[in-house]
Structures are given as C-alpha cells and as structure tokens.
Amino acid sequence: QQEGMGRVADATTLTELAGYDGRLYKIVADAQINGYGPRHGEQWKTVRQNAELYIRKTAAVMDTPDERAWAEKAERHFTAAVDIFEKEMLPILRSGPADARTRAMDDRIDGELAAMSDLYEKIKASTAREAREADEEYDDTARRYGVIGVSISLAMTATLLLTALLTTRAVAGPVRAMTEAMRRLADGDLTIAIPAQNRRDEIGAMAGAMLVFKDSLQRNRAMEEEARQTDQRAAAEKR
C-alpha cells in the first residue's frame, strides 16, 4: 500500500512537469508573433528554472530501468529545445522580426518538446501501472486476513493523469494553432481565421493582437489596390 501511495506522489510530480512543454512553447510563439522583448527573457528564465526543478525531481523518483531511460531521453529533448531557442532563435529575434529561419527553428522546438511530453506520458503510464499492481497486492493480502482493501490511490492516479493530459492539450494545442495562423499571415494569407479569440487568458490576448495585425494587413492591401486603380485611371486619361 505504501508503494502504491508513493507512485501516486510520483504521478503528482509528473503532472506538474507535463504542463511545461506548453508553457515553454507559448513563450517561443509569443516572441515570434509580437516580437522579442525583455519580458520574454524573464518568462523564459522562470519557466525554464521551474521545468529543470521538476525534471530533477522526476529523475529522483524513477525506480525502473525503463523509467530512468525515458527520463534521461526526455531531459535531452528538453535541453535540445532550450539550446535551439537560446542559441539559434534568440539572436535572430533580438535583431529583427521572425522569418523563415525562425519558423524552421519553431518546428524543431515543437518537435523536441512534443517528444519530451510523449516520454513523460510513458513514465506516467508506468507509474500508474505500478500503483495498480501495488494496490492489487495489498488487496490480496487484505482479503487473506479478512480486511477490506481500499484502492483510493488508483482513483487519485487516474485523476492526476487525466488532469495532466487535459492541461497539456488545453495549452499546447491552441498555441500551435496560433503559430500556424501566424505563419499563414506572414505568407500573406488573409483568409485565415484567427483561433482562440473568445479565450480570456494569455492565448486570448495573443489572438487579439493577431486580429489587429490581420486587420492592419487588410487595410494596407486595400489601400494598395486603390492606389493601383487610381494610377491606372490616371494613365488611361493621359492616353
């Protein structure tokens, strides 16, 4: 029973860590959409330090060879994502707007963070299985001695895993949709619908900023078309 409860505590640590791929990616996307500023550096430093703390805590509670191998690989993906952003993307964003190079780096960062998240999902599944097995052993022992076993830890583990999954999807999914919309706007596609406009969080604020940017592009395009037509009429009158 103590082992099962210990694995529930491990799942709590993993739940905290699961949300960090979306938090890191949100900073990357915002720096590209709105331009890099000092706040991005401060946000990145804080989120990175917290993620590193939970990565160390996670590594400390891994008790099977597979879990330790997954944790080490996940940390390498995290380090790779950090290096791409800090060593490759930041120098470009500090000197100017996002471009094709930063969009390619964005895809690489997204891939590294997604791989990290997938590995921690494997670890969570492993801890859930271990908690279940420990509870089953406890129940068998309790039945032998006429004691009714209570498997609360299973319900707690399932709730924590579900919360982690929903949190990750709720953050990472909309941010990726925002980044895709930003890319299409940068390519001149004004038909793109800006996602997440009804949200009341940071993602909703990003959507509002993108909507203003899209409206500005549409006005500029309309003015360019009007100027072109005016020039054509003037040329026709001269003839």
Image (cartoon, rainbow, N blue to C red):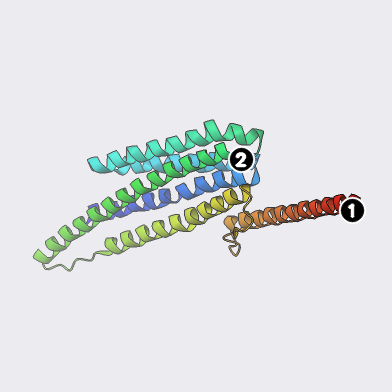
Whether residue 237 can be seen here: yes
Of the pair 93 and 200, the residue shown nearer to us: 93
Residue at (30, 49) in percent of width and height:
122
Relative horizontal placement of residue 113, taking residue 73 as reference (left or right): right
Quarter holding the N terminus is bottom left
Residue 217 pos. (x, y %): 71, 52
Whether residue 50 can be seen here: no
Of the pair 25 and 237, the residue shown nearer to us: 237
Going from N to C along the chain, the mark reached first, 2 or 1, is 2
Of the pair 212 and 100, the residue shown nearer to us: 100
- Specify the amino acid type for callout 2: Ala
Residue 109 pos. (x, y %): 47, 41
Q: Which quadrant would residue 79 be assigned to in this image?
A: top left
The residue at which mark 1 appears reads as 237
- The label shown at residue 102 is none
Residue at (57, 48) in percent of width and height:
183
The residue at which mark 2 appears reads as 98
Image depth: mark 2 or mark 1 in front: 1
- Mark 2 crowdedness (10 Å alpha carbons): few <14, some 14-19, many ≥20: many
Residue 16 pos. (x, y %): 42, 51
- Specify the amino acid type for callout 1: Glu
